[in-house]
Amino acid sequence: MIRFYNGRLLAMNGGMDVTGDEVWTDGSVISYVGPEKPAAERPAFEREIDLDGDLLMPGFKNAHAHTAMVFARSYADDVPLQTWLFDNVIPLEGKLNEERIYDLARLGILEYLTGGITASFDMYYLRAPYVRANLDMGFRTVICGGSAPYELIRAEYDRYNAIDPLIRYIPGIHAEYTVTQEELEAVQRLCSEEKAPCFAHNSETEREVMECRRRRDGMTPTQFLESLGLFDYGGGGFHCVWMDEKDREIFQRRGLWAVSCPASNAKLSSGIAPLQDYLDWGINLALGTDGAASNNALDMFREMYLACVLQKLRTGDAAACDAGRILEAACRGGALAMGLTDCDCVAVGKQADLIVADLHRPNMRPLLNIPKNLVYSGSKENVRLTMVAGKVLYENGEFFVGDDPARIYARAEESVKAMLSA
Amino acid sequence: MIRFYNGRLLAMNGGMDVTGDEVWTDGSVISYVGPEKPAAERPAFEREIDLDGDLLMPGFKNAHAHTAMVFARSYADDVPLQTWLFDNVIPLEGKLNEERIYDLARLGILEYLTGGITASFDMYYLRAPYVRANLDMGFRTVICGGSAPYELIRAEYDRYNAIDPLIRYIPGIHAEYTVTQEELEAVQRLCSEEKAPCFAHNSETEREVMECRRRRDGMTPTQFLESLGLFDYGGGGFHCVWMDEKDREIFQRRGLWAVSCPASNAKLSSGIAPLQDYLDWGINLALGTDGAASNNALDMFREMYLACVLQKLRTGDAAACDAGRILEAACRGGALAMGLTDCDCVAVGKQADLIVADLHRPNMRPLLNIPKNLVYSGSKENVRLTMVAGKVLYENGEFFVGDDPARIYARAEESVKAMLSA
């Protein structure tokens, strides 16, 4: 049991109130949230963490990730989109193997921890070594998978939803423009049998939507997937930059999640997703970093900040996109999008996926409004502690992930070198 | 004398090459840059800093700042521009006094140090306590001042250009839309007598330019100031979002500095300055944070990142705005804009305004391209050390500024509370 005391709490359990409540954990779950109890009524803790006025809050959920893509960080920046993708990223990606995925995923997970991210919604190749990296480090991930034939995705679904409480699996397809008919049918059948949600890259670029309309009888990616019944049990889309009125109506009616990746969309000049419209429509919102190839950081502070200020630029209205709504999307929204209904807020019985934000840094002062501070001036320098499932994985700049970070850096560098020279 | 060794050097002395050279300082200046010398040829150092592979580079120059405005951080976000300015910021600003400016400036300077900023180009009220804060903490600032009558600005100019090597003074006017005729004449006379450059807020919003044209016989702010001879000896503009072809021609011909503040311009929905056009025109470029009221962080990593990705959004071209050019603007450009020709790069005889970037963090790996890493995935977590004029003011999260940061936070919080309740 661990006790967090003498601090502030942003529980996000229905609102953005900051209280003085303390929090206890027991194993992987939160066992108490409330005012300080007299010493006699407190159990024996294995550790008592004096927050010293700092802020305890739910961790950020990275609701769209390709964690292992850190290999392409700073590999091909400031080049046209087509050059970046076809001459650089895809050829290098072809040199991945199981061991490299493991090495690279571990580097990505270290980065998540430095930024207070406690779970990622990951879509990528070679799931076995990726899952192993998460389990070895104690990190939480939801895999968004699409495979064919049916037997393969069924086996993955069963396997990864049973392997460990840290791992879950939600069906998905990469995108309308890459999916095969066989894969579509396999995912369709699985979603229908399991009443499972379905996610896909969706309307990231204007060109993608135009080409989809040409191929699919005038339907957008959203309309195409809806027509196949893939959203019958919920799900959502990654990016959602170019959504027409009918798409929005589908997202709204189905309770689908628009997972926005503002940094990636900016760097690749894909556009600015109309997040204020989505808020107005009551469309569910989450945020993701996308992969390091296109971001290049895996940093939810960056995503929150950009989400807000890009709306102000897009609408010409400095009042657009309230920071509190975006902070909620980054924590609670992401959890719910990923099906992590036990990781959405700080309450008894929920998973202890928590972070401590250091308020003893100049960028957090004065303490006029803590949620606005987090979104508009917060940065990774403010992450004092990151806890996943009740275990401290990162604290005061140090990692507790079962291996020396120097070794993880070295292995990742070696993998990238090998890929570049292969 | 201090020795930095066993690391990497980004000297920015004509290019973005990273070498293995070591650097020595002697007092406030750099005394050696080159390969390691045998122990027998090295002087006795007061300290030898093992970089352990980390990166030594010039500090960032915040070329547009209102340092003391940290009082308004998170005070009025997500409200319309006019409400923000007239109902919130200006009334609160009216409650500043000398002691509060001192307290708040010290908080702002702490924040600069955490982000590797080694100088600021500051335009604000009540210069005496601001200068005192800089001198007490050992920070470097160039005041951009405009006062009237002539005798007043002349006295300020003489006083602050002689008070200490850390302080300089460059004439400026707040903006075309606030300046009085008397102030214009005073600044004009001073610039002419001293052959001094002149800076001003310039073309921050479209409305500002339209209203200027109405008032000033069709002239834009740039054309108006040029017509008065205020740019005869150089200078530049803060923001420069809405510049027409004639404005750009004046900036290009005169070698004026466009000081861009992308974060502030985004948050207040002022627009995206056409930085790629300025680069194409050969217009001198520097970056600034503006004040915390509109940013809300004082973080040049944020400015560099935004400068690049907003150009990609604006132009629809992922190749727009090369990161190396923006990194140069943030360091060398800022120094030259502020007249700090001795702070622009790492070379013998230059001021030792240096930072160490921690490359042993996940966001800096792999080390494929260090300048791109700094711009696209770098953050304040990577600032290991900040040195101004040969003195280490910040290292490994600790401040060495002559006072306890807890006391500086407390004083700033008290000042803000007093202002809010006044």
Image (cartoon, coloured by chain):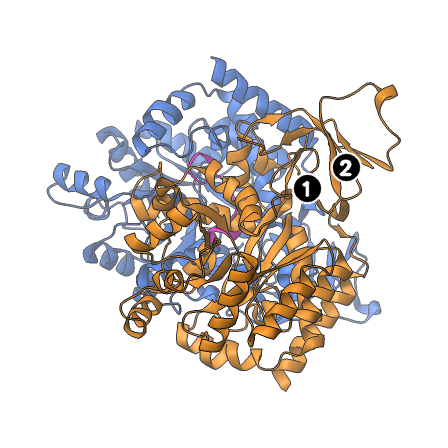
Chain colours: A blue, B orange
Total number of numbered discs in the rendering: 2
Which type of secondary structure does the marked residue at label 1 adopt? strand
The quadrant in which residue A256 appears is bottom left
Quadrant containing the N terminus of chain A in the rendered view: bottom right
- Residue at the far top in the pictured view: A422
Q: Nearer the viewer, residue B157 or A208?
A: B157
Residue occupying the point 61% across, 74% down: B152
Query: Is residue A308 visible from the viewing direction of this image?
Result: no
- Callouts 1 and 2 close, C-beta under 8 Å: yes
What residue would you read off at disc 1? Answer: B354
Where B93 sits versus B205, above or below?
below
- Residue at the far bottom in the pictured view: B422
Residue occupying the point 37% across, 46% down: B278
Q: Nearer the viewer, residue B131 or A315?
A: B131
Amino acid marked by disc 2: Thr
Q: Nearer the viewer, residue A28 or B361?
A: B361
Q: Chain of mark 1?
A: B
Local packing at callout 1 (Cα closer than 10 Å; few below 14, some 14-19, many 20+) is many
Per the rendering, the mark at residue B388 is none
Residue A22: percent from left, percent from top: 70, 66
Amino acid marked by disc 1: Leu
Q: Nearer the viewer, residue A275 or B49?
A: B49
What residue would you read off at disc 2? Answer: B25
> What range is drawn magenta here?
A292-304
